[in-house]
Image (cartoon, rainbow, N blue to C red):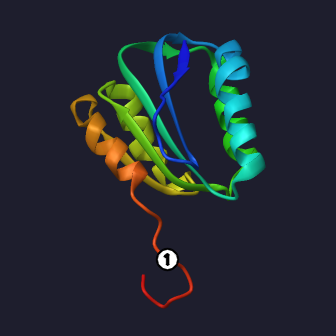
Amino acid sequence: MIEQIAGLPPGTLGFRASGQVTASDYERVLVPDVEAAFAVNRKLRLLYHAGPGFTGFEPGAMWEDAMLGFRHFSGWDRVALVTDVPWLRVASLAMGFVIPAHFKLFHDAELDEAIAWISEPRPASGNGNT
């Protein structure tokens, strides 16, 4: 199951995964929210929490996740993954270089830190300060 995490700043989406995540979960919750957000934002930030109740992805869910990322390949600003699931941490570290955004991995106990990081204001552009 996937549910949206409320209270994040505009241009930032958060989702919490629990149990077995299915393609239907993506189609009903995540994809419509992401597509609606991209309709009004050029860049998005994403917080994804696969917490202690998360048991895995069905193959169709993994496909939906990949396709969503490819559809908006250059549209991601920051992506935070919060999880203690060993295989998910290893996979994200191994594949982090293909994520077209600033990616950061957090442990479950660091959820508040992940929310703070994903919510940091974007630096002003065009003023020479980076």
Q: Is residue 27 left or right of residue 52?
A: right
- Image location of residue 84, percent across then percent down: 29, 27
Task: Using the image as rendered, state which of residue 96 and residue 39 is in the foreground.
Answer: 39
Depicted 80 relative to depicted 6: above or below: below
The quarter of the picture where the C terminus appears is: bottom left
Residue at 45% x, 35% y: name it. Answer: 7
Q: Residues within 10 Å of mark 1 (few under 14, many from 20)?
A: few
Q: Is residue 89 left or right of residue 75?
A: left
- Image location of residue 80, percent across then percent down: 42, 44
Residue marked by disc 1: 124
Residue at 47% x, 40% y: name it. Answer: 8
Dividing the picture into quarters, in which one does residue 26 lie?
A: top right
Residue at 54% x, 79% y: name it. Answer: 125
- Image location of residue 59, percent across then percent down: 64, 18
Q: Amino acid at mark 1?
A: Ala
Task: Using the image as rendered, state which of residue 26 and residue 45 is in the foreground.
Answer: 45
The mark total stands at 1
Residue extending furthest toward the bottom: 128
The quarter of the picture where the N terminus appears is: top right
Q: Is residue 89 left or right of residue 36?
A: left
Depicted 58 relative to depicted 96: above or below: above
Dividing the picture into quarters, in which one does residue 87 lie?
A: top left
Local secondary structure at mark 1: loop
- Image location of residue 121, percent across then percent down: 43, 62
Residue at 44% x, 36% y: name it. Answer: 91
